[in-house]
Image (cartoon, rainbow, N blue to C red):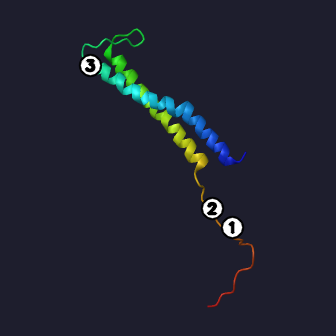
Amino acid sequence: MDKRTVGIIGLVVAILFCGLPGLCGLCAGPLYVVVGLIPGSEIDMFGSSDPSSAIGWGIGTICLSVLFVAIPVLVWYFTLRKKPAAAEVVDYSGPLPPDDM
């Protein structure tokens, strides 16, 4: 397989395992924050009924989800971008040109 095919496979795997869970977290995180801000809502975050636990969980989910969404973008950038052409190599080991002064 050539490098481009491997890059496309890596990008699809990164999207499935990082991008999609990240997008789900970006949907769920703000929901946790909003529910934590509603007065009188019934909150059960792993046995805690404190609204600050829901808000903290939501903010943490948002931060982690942003990182998860960034991973496929970085995989795409480093594997599928067009790399600039290599600079021309100049050989300086030959004799110097004559001075015409």
Label 1 packing within 10 angstroms: few (<14), some (14-19), many (20+) = few
Q: Quadrant of the N terminus?
A: top right
Marks 1/2: CA distance?
12 Å
Asked if residue 53 shows in the view, the reply is yes
Image depth: mark 2 or mark 3 in front = 3
Which numbered disc covers residue 52? none
Question: Going by the picture, which residue comes out furthest to the left?
Answer: 39
Residue type at mark 2: give it.
Answer: Ala
Q: Residues within 10 Å of mark 2 (few under 14, many from 20)?
A: few
Q: Is residue 80 left or right of residue 31?
A: right
The disc placed on residue 38 is: 3
Q: Residue at x 57, y 42 (%)?
A: 75
Question: What secondary structure is marked by label 2?
Answer: loop
The residue under label 1 is 89
On the image, numbered disc 2 is attached to which residue? 85
Is the residue 101 above or below the residue 64 in the image? below
Q: Secondary structure at mark 1?
A: loop
Q: Earlier in the sequence, mark 2 or mark 3?
A: 3
Q: Residue furthest bottom?
A: 101
Q: Disc 1 or 3, which lies upstream in sequence?
A: 3
- The kind of residue on which mark 3 rests is Ile
Q: Tell me if I can see residue 59 in this picture.
A: no
On the image, the x and y values in percent for residue 85 come to 62, 61
Q: Are marks 1 and 3 in contact (CB under 8 Å)?
A: no
Residue 38 vs 91, above or below: the answer is: above
Question: Residue 95 lies in what quarter of the image?
Answer: bottom right
Q: Which quarter of the rendered picture does the C terminus lie within?
A: bottom right
Observer-nearest residue: 97 or 72?
A: 72
Q: Amino acid at mark 1?
A: Val
Residue 19 spot, x, y in % from top left: 51, 34
Find residue 37 and report its horizontal and vertical position in percent.
Answer: 28, 21
